Image: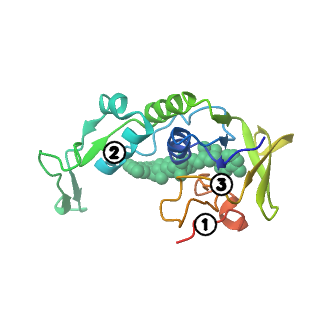
Amino acid sequence: MDCDVAIIGYGPVGATAAALLGGQGLTVAVVERMAGVYDKPRAITADHEVMRCMQFAGIGTELGAHVRPHPGTRYLGVDGNTIKQTDVIPPPYPLGWPTGIHFIQPEFEAMLRRAVARHGNVEVLLAHELVDLADLGDSIASRSGIWRGRRPARSERDISWPVTAPTASCAESSGSTMKTSPSTSGGSSWMRGSGGPRRCPR
Ligand SMILES: Cc1cc2nc3c(=O)[nH]c(=O)nc-3n(C[C@H](O)[C@H](O)[C@H](O)COP(=O)(O)OP(=O)(O)OC[C@H]3O[C@@H](n4cnc5c(N)ncnc54)[C@H](O)[C@@H]3O)c2cc1C
């Protein structure tokens, strides 16, 4: 499979990248080892800039109907006294959304995935784990296998994407080229230490 951008990991960050890049008309491949959305909420709060991003990703209205304004946070010490308090600002909101919101992560991720599915140029490989990355000079090749517990059972799909591709994914890059595959595979991914993915030039 050839694509402009390969996204490794389909958590909230990978799904956001897929929705945004798919919306820009790029061909995108997503590899995710889990078969579905992780069913436990980890993140529960976000801010108004996230909501703006979700508007661009195509789920602003749908998500907006499911979030609740954040009431602020009071941190208590062991003696019950307030040691820190964060307040939210009242309307009118500078970005059109409450500055802090509560959301339900599995519900939110499912919305994002439905937005991705609306882009015919994004292919999602669920239950696949990226197991190898190779720098071919002008392109990057990856290998993914069907995910069965801790180890992929067998090699299933090869994906390659050019080191230079037309893209809007790296806002800071000069010109219209990219030199990266977004590493969206979370904190425990082996890619963190592999040195494989390249970074956007600054
Ligand atoms: C208890 C808790 C509370 C939190 N609260 C908040 C909060 O209130 N607000 C907030 O903004 N954040 C919060 N966070 C952090 C938030 O959950 C994470 O920052 C967010 O989930 C990261 O998203 P991600 O897409 O980068 O990574 P992940 O959600 O970790 O997704 C990475 C994906 O990559 C996949 N993957 C990894 N390696 C491979 C591979 N080799 N091949 C294929 N797929 C692979 C994984 O299966 C996973 O689905 C909280 C986290 C925790 C644990």
Amino acid beneath label 3: Ala
Identify the mark at residue 81; answer none if there is no mark: none
Residue at (33, 45) in percent of width and height: 52
N-terminal of the pair, mark 3 or mark 2, is: 2
Q: Position of residue 107 (x, y in %)?
A: 44, 30
Report if the beta carbon of the residue with label 3 is closer than 8 angstroms to ligand 1.
no
Q: Quadrant of the N terminus?
A: top right
N-terminal of the pair, mark 2 or mark 1, is: 2
Closest to the observer, 138 or 105:
138
Q: Are marks 2 and 1 in contact (CB under 8 Å)?
A: no
Closest to the observer, 59 or 37:
59
Report if the beta carbon of the residue with label 2 is closer than 8 angstroms to ligand 1.
no
Q: Position of residue 156 (x, y in %)?
A: 84, 38
| Residue 31 visible to an observer of this rendering | no
Closer mark to the observer between disc 3 and disc 2 = 3
| Residue 137 visible to an observer of this rendering | yes
Q: Is residue 159 left or right of residue 67?
A: right
Q: Which residue is mark 2?
A: 52
Q: Which residue is mark 1?
A: 199
Amino acid beneath label 2: Arg
Is 172 above or below relative to 122?
A: below
Residue at (48, 59) in percent of width and height: 171
Q: Which residue is mark 3?
A: 165
Q: Is residue 25 left or right of residue 151?
A: left
Query: Badge 2: few (under 14), some or many (20 or more) residues near its Cα, within 10 Å?
Result: some
Is 138 above or below relative to 115?
A: below
Q: Are marks 3 and 2 in contact (CB under 8 Å)?
A: no
Q: Seen from this angle, which residue lies furthest front?
A: 175
